[in-house]
Amino acid sequence: MRREAKRSEKEQAHLARLQAHAGERAEASTLAQDFANLVRQRQPDTLATWLERAIASCLQPLQSFAKGVREDSTAVQAGGTLSWSTGPVAGQINRLKMLQRPRYGRAHIDRLRQRVLLPT
């Protein structure tokens, strides 16, 4: 799923072999690459056509994925058009969870607060 410019020769050859096969492998490879490009290039206007292609495919996992994306299409389109991200917040939440896990039920809240506010 790497970008074309970042693929090694071995990966390029493997992808070419996948696409040379007729049927499910080629279709899965093409749909997956098209979806990755759609997300990377932030093109939510092409999402509807991709969803139709995926649902019409013979691949049950891609059909299921496409149906789930279609159910939440407003959020998916907003993710492709809005410029803000929750990444920094998610990182802080992950850090707090990692700090809490070893001390769950055993450490006092003051000690946890000290570790969160004054990381070592």
Image (tube, helix red, strand yellow):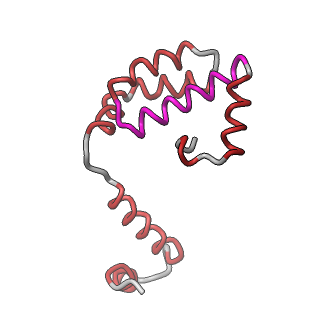
29 is within the stretch colored magenta: yes
Residue 60 locus on image (x, y percent) = 63, 21
Query: Bounds of the magenta span?
Result: 22-43
Residue 25 locus on image (x, y percent) = 70, 25
Residue drawn at the location 67% of the way across and 23% of the way down: 26
Residue drawn at the location 49% of the way across and 36% of the way down: 36
Where's the C terminus, which quadrant? bottom left
Horizontal arrangement in the rendering, residue 16 relative to residue 6 (left or right):
right
Q: Is residue 40 above or below residue 93?
A: above
Count of picture labels: 0
**Residue 10, quarter of picture:** top right
Horizontal arrangement in the rendering, residue 111 relative to residue 58 (left or right):
left
Horizontal arrangement in the rendering, residue 15 relative to residue 71 (left or right):
right
Q: Is residue 99 above or below residue 88?
A: below
Q: Is residue 34 above or below residue 14?
A: above
Residue drawn at the location 48% of the way across and 31% of the way down: 35
39 is within the stretch colored magenta: yes
Secondary structure, magenta segment, majority class: helix
Residue 8 locus on image (x, y percent) = 65, 48
Which of 105/54 is in front? 54
Which of 97/1 is in front? 1
Where's the N terminus, which quadrant? top right
